[in-house]
């Protein structure tokens, strides 16, 4: 846990020191394990077309905006899943407890990336400029990635995640028909297998650039920058006689991977950031303030942090995972989204 003393790895797929050493050795050696090429999916095999994705996207925008405008929690949550469901649930909880409106957006022209899949689950990705509607006034446009999924035939399409890009999206590989190329969470041709990517990012966020994982994770606001922000907050709380702990850890949500033109991958995944502000040894003391954005999530507005305050976040990240053969490359986390997911004071 972040404070300089780590009490455990922060991700469900634990990346041990031996595994990390193996990854670094492969990088230094500059050779990728062999892997059988994916079987091509023909037009006749596809169960999701580009036009299907466009229709699904338009239907979602209409339904989600109607639900947000009317405060219809059932409708709003029915078309969301995974990390996006958790974020929306927090927004609808805040609407019920404090009257805070659910976020509404205005969208620009979308670009679709639809993998050529013949089996379920089906999924696709959209990048689009998005503005937050702030009571009739639109905020600045931000380039946003949205991921949609249909788990099985007959089930509804849902928005499973969204994240704001900090930098340009790399070129996505497409086949001759314009379809993107799906990848697996265990693809050995990448610098990091996607199923351990979150673990490696978490090690840097929890322990900083001195952690060995920094050898394969690029510096930036969502890695070393997040560590620096959390460490600075811990220092400020220590000056008040309080202890602040943080831990970035994995969430059991599906990941989504898509091949980039250079043989790497775009990886979309969810994480939790769990934070605690407490009196040393949890001895009761003067009340610890609850952050404003977490007050609507308290089980009772009368909760008081005499011992501790828990303020947990859910985050969605997008990372560029380079091909293993790319010299001196590192994973770059290029997009994030998220918000409060749980608050408790006692």
Image (cartoon, grey):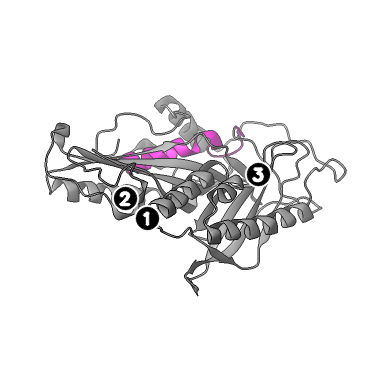
219 horizontally vs 188: left or right: left
Name the residue that disc number 2 marks: 295
- Cα separation, mark 2 vs mark 1, equals 9 Å
Q: Please give the name of the residue rendered at 56% of the width and 44% of the height, measured from the top-left corner.
A: 267
Q: Which residue, as the protein is rendered here, is positioned at the far right? A: 44
Position above or below: 161 against 19? below
Element type where label 1 sits in the image: helix
Q: Which residues are magenta?
A: 186-210
- Cα separation, mark 1 vs mark 3, equals 31 Å
Residue 187 marker = none
* Disc number lying in front (1 or 3): 1
Q: Please give the name of the residue rendered at 18% of the width and 37% of the height, measured from the top-left corner.
A: 307
Residue 98 marker = 1
If you read the primary sequence from the N terminus, does the residue marked by circle 2 or circle 1 appear first?
A: 1
Residue 108 in which image quadrant: bottom right
- Is there CB contact under 8 Å for labels 2 and 1? yes
């Amino acid at each position: 846990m972040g404070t300089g003393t780590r009490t455990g790895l922060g991700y469900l797929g634990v990346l041990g020191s031996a595994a990390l050493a193996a990854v670094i050795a492969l990088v230094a050696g500059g050779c990728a394990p062999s892997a059988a090429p994916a079987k091509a999916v023909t037009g006749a095999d596809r169960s999701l077309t580009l036009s299907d994705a466009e229709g699904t996207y338009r239907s979602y925008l209409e339904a989600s905006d109607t639900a947000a405008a009317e405060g219809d929690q059932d409708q709003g949550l029915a078309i969301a899943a995974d990390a996006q469901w958790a974020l929306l649930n927090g927004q609808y909880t805040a609407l019920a407890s404090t009257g805070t409106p659910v976020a509404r957006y205005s969208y620009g022209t979308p670009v679709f990336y639809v993998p050529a899949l013949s089996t379920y689950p089906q999924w696709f990705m959209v990048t689009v400029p998005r503005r937050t509607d702030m009571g009739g006034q639109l905020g600045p446009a931000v380039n946003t990635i949205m991921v949609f999924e249909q788990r099985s035939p007959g089930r509804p399409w849902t928005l499973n995640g969204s994240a704001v890009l900090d930098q340009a999206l790399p070129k996505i590989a497409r086949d001759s028909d314009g379809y993107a190329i799906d990848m697996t969470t265990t693809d050995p041709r990448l610098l990091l297998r996607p199923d351990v990517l979150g673990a490696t990012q978490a090690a840097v966020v929890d322990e900083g650039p001195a952690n060995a994982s920094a050898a394969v994770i690029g510096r930036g606001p969502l890695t070393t920058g997040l560590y620096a922000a959390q460490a600075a907050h811990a220092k400020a709380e220590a000056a008040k006689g309080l202890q602040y702990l943080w831990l970035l850890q994995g969430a059991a949500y599906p990941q989504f991977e898509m091949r980039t033109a250079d043989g790497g991958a775009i990886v979309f995944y969810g994480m939790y950031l769990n934070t605690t502000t407490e009196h040393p040894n949890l001895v009761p003391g003067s009340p610890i303030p609850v952050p404003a954005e977490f007050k609507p999530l308290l089980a009772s507005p009368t909760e008081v942090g005499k011992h501790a305050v828990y303020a947990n976040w859910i985050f969605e990240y997008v990372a560029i995972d380079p091909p293993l053969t790319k010299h001196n490359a590192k994973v770059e986390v290029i997009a994030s989204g998220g918000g409060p997911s749980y608050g408790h004071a006692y």
